[in-house]
Amino acid sequence: MATFRIGVILPGVGVQRRDGVTLREAAGHAEDAGLDGVWHGDHLAIGGPTLDAPIALATAAAATSRITIGTSVFVPAIRPLAWAAKQIASLQYVSDGRLVLGVGSGGGPGQWAAAGVPYTQRGHRSDTALELLPRLLAGEPVVFPT
């Protein structure tokens, strides 16, 4: 029989405020309940308050010791690639290797406009990120395309 791993999406700012729960408490509760992981989305602008995914996941990592922390999904192409690699490596470090990185090409045009990145470059930048991120994270020298 297959083994299943079960995780939950961490509550957003609105839910935290409404229910009076902190991100640390939610992550700790997930671990205490025996779940396998907690996840957080990576949105720059979604029409309401939202936390930065790397910071939210670093908070969850600090509040837990066993469960996986993960992105659902991280959008490396919307930010400078060296910065994305640093965020990923930092999360892996502060979580003691518990990061699972889900990667996507990002939300709608509004998020890309807010980042100052043309939406039409989304696919190309995502392809470049998927090609170069593993090398950056391995510490290999990388020449960034211009």
Image: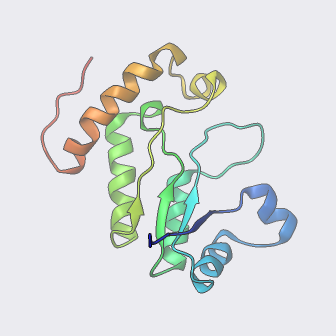
> In the rendered view of the protein, which quadrant contains the C terminus?
top left
Residue at left offset 17%, top offset 28%: 143
Query: x%, y% of residue 132?
Result: 25, 35
Relative to 84, 50 lies left or right: right
Pick the front one: 45 or 70: 70
Image x and y of residue 76, in percent: 42, 38
Q: How many marks?
A: 0
Horizontal arrangement in the rendering, residue 12 relative to residue 141 (left or right): right
Q: Nearer the viewer, residue 47 or 128?
A: 128
The N terminus lies in quadrant: bottom left
The quadrant holding residue 33 is: bottom right
Q: Position of residue 41 (x, y in %)?
A: 59, 49
- Residue furthest out toward the top: 120
Query: Is 104 in front, or is 48?
Result: 104
Spot the residue most to the bottom: 32
Q: Residue at x 19, y 42 (%)?
A: 135
Left or right: 108 with respect to 12? left
- Residue drawn at point x = 35 percent, y = 63 percent: 92
Residue 117 picture location, percent across and down:
50, 21
Q: Residue furthest front?
A: 1
Q: Farthest right residue?
A: 18
Question: Which quadrant holds residue 123?
Answer: top left
Is 127 located above or below residue 138 in the figure?
above
